[in-house]
Image (cartoon, rainbow, N blue to C red):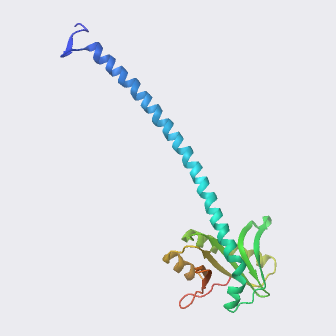
Amino acid sequence: METTQAIGEGLTFEKVWAAIMELRESQKETDRQIQENGRQMRESGKRLDKQLGELGNRFGEMVEYMVIPNLLTKFNELGFTFTKAGRNKITDKEHDIFAEVDAFLENGDKVMVVETKTKPGIDDINDHIERMEKLRKYADLHDDKRKYLGAIAGVVFGGSEKTYALKNGFYVIEPSGDTFNITTPTGTYYPHEW
């Protein structure tokens, strides 16, 4: 059989084969471009994730600077007598205890540990529960008999997140006009002491 035999009207085997080979080369180039585009998108995604993380940290700092200066006053209005406020970092390598605290309010017999988030989620509340347990362990190791209480401050609280925080015994701090309100766990919920 001749390779130049007509396959269809005006088409020869050589033309079809050349078209197939051209199509294969074109597909290889398309695949290469898709891989390159995917790599660029992953790099862009990483940069965007980093930028969003930095932005989230800035929002968190903003919440801390807006809330912390007035915490003593607001909690004292609720009947506490906190005399000292600040940030705190606990490190005890021997007992594997590490905790960073956004706001630490103190008096002679109580400590209020406040975690600040832009938009607190269930995971943030669970993290704060773990933090409180670590702080209690650290306090016990250092003969600190004070009662530890917890609070979560946030710019935006979802209804289920607020309920979950209150259910776990946390005070909830959220904006209200020019200042903020503190919701106390009441009713079936009560302030948890660690």
- In the depicted view, which residue is nearer to us: 179 or 73? 179
Q: Can you say whether 129 is above or below 190 in the image?
A: above
> For the point 55% across and 73% down, which residue is it?
156
Residue 104 seen: yes
- In the depicted view, which residue is nearer to us: 123 or 137? 123
> For the point 62% across and 86% down, which residue is it?
191
Please state the total of marks drawn on the protein image: 0
Which image quarter: residue 140? Answer: bottom right
- In the depicted view, which residue is nearer to us: 97 or 179? 179
Q: List the single residue furthest toward the left.
A: 9
Residue 74: percent from left, percent from top: 68, 86
> Is 146 left, or right, of 187 in this rendering?
right
> Is 109 left, or right, of 78 in this rendering?
right
Q: List the single residue furthest toward the right.
A: 142
Q: Can you say whether 23 is above or below 194 in the image?
A: above
> Is 55 left, or right, of 40 in this rendering?
right
Residue 136 seen: no
Q: List the single residue furthest toward the front.
A: 178
Residue 56: percent from left, percent from top: 61, 62
Residue 76: percent from left, percent from top: 71, 89
Quarter holding the N terminus is: top left
> For the point 49% across and 77% down, which residue is it?
159
Which image quarter: residue 7? Answer: top left
Q: Can you say whether 21 is above or below 126 in the image?
A: above
> For the point 56% across and 70% down, which residue is it?
119
Quarter holding the C terminus is: bottom right
> Is 122 left, or right, of 129 in this rendering?
left
Which image quarter: residue 193? Answer: bottom right
Residue 80: percent from left, percent from top: 71, 90
